[in-house]
Image (cartoon, rainbow, N blue to C red):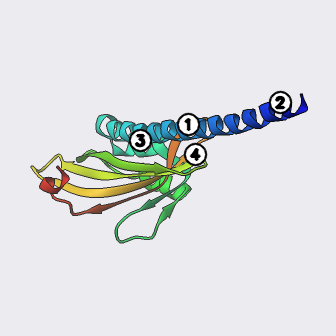
Amino acid sequence: MNKVLVYIIVVFSFTSCNLFQKKKETDLVAEKQKMMDTDKAFSDMSVQKGMKNAFMEYIDSNGVLLRPNQMPVVGADAIDYLIQINDSAYTLRWEPKHGAIAQSGELGYTYGLYELKLSTKDSVIYGTYVSIWKKQSDGSWKFVLDSGNEGVGKEEQE
């Protein structure tokens, strides 16, 4: 009888560990998708309400902006930097192409392609970007680092 009980406990233990691992993998896939969807919603808000509003909504309180020809802009300074932007002369949109999430499910990144359309000219600037995301205590995602590089042509984006 004791052997049967031990056998049942061992089998149950292995089965539950396997189920736990599959659930964790499923949760990570779902969290990655949620992060990717957040990046897309971030872009949609940039188009609809302006880049400044979108960045103010999605930046973490300790977020970092990496911009050309200047030192990293961090935390409250990043928020002050964003407040001062006049984004009425252009529309910024982007599309996440890939992302990954840490095993902890608390940190991840996305990267993709962006286009900046100038309102006063018939020109568009294309480039690439990367954002590092942190899961917030309420389950939402905010970026903790954002950077972009100009220079991808339209034909290369497609």
| Residue 31 visible in the snapshot | yes
Say what secondary structure mark 2 lies in: helix
Q: Residue furthest left?
A: 122
Q: Mark 3 touching mark 4, by CB under 8 A? A: no
What is the CA distance from the residue labelled 3 to the residue labelled 2?
48 Å
Q: What's the residue type where badge 3 is placed?
A: Met
Say whether marks 1 and 4 touch (CB < 8 Å).
yes
Q: Taking 68 as reference, is 146 left or right?
A: right
Which amino acid does the dot numbered 2 rest on? Val
Q: CA distance from mark 4 to mark 2?
A: 38 Å
Indicate which disc, 1 or 3, sits on the residue closer to the N terminus: 1
Near-viewer residue (47 or 28):
28
Q: Earlier in the sequence, mark 3 or mark 2?
A: 2
3 or 136: nearer the eye?
3
Residue occupying image coordinates x 20% and y 60%: 152
The residue that appears at 83% across and 30% down in the rendered structure is 4
Which circle's residue, 1 or 2, is located before the other in the chain?
Answer: 2
Q: Mark 3, residues whose alpha carbon is within 10 Å: few (<14), some, or many (≥20)? A: many
Category of crowding for the residue at label 2, using alpha-carbon neighbours closer than 10 angstroms: few (below 14), some (14–19), many (at least 20):
few
The Cα–Cα distance between marks 1 and 2, rounded to whole angstroms, is: 34 Å
Of 25 and 152, nearer the camera is 25
- Write the residue at 73% across / 35% down: 11
Within-10-Å neighbours for mark 1: few <14, some 14–19, many 20+:
few
What residue sits right under mark 4 in the picture? 105
Residue denoted by label 1: 27
Circle nearer the N terminus (4, 2): 2
Label 2, on which residue? 4
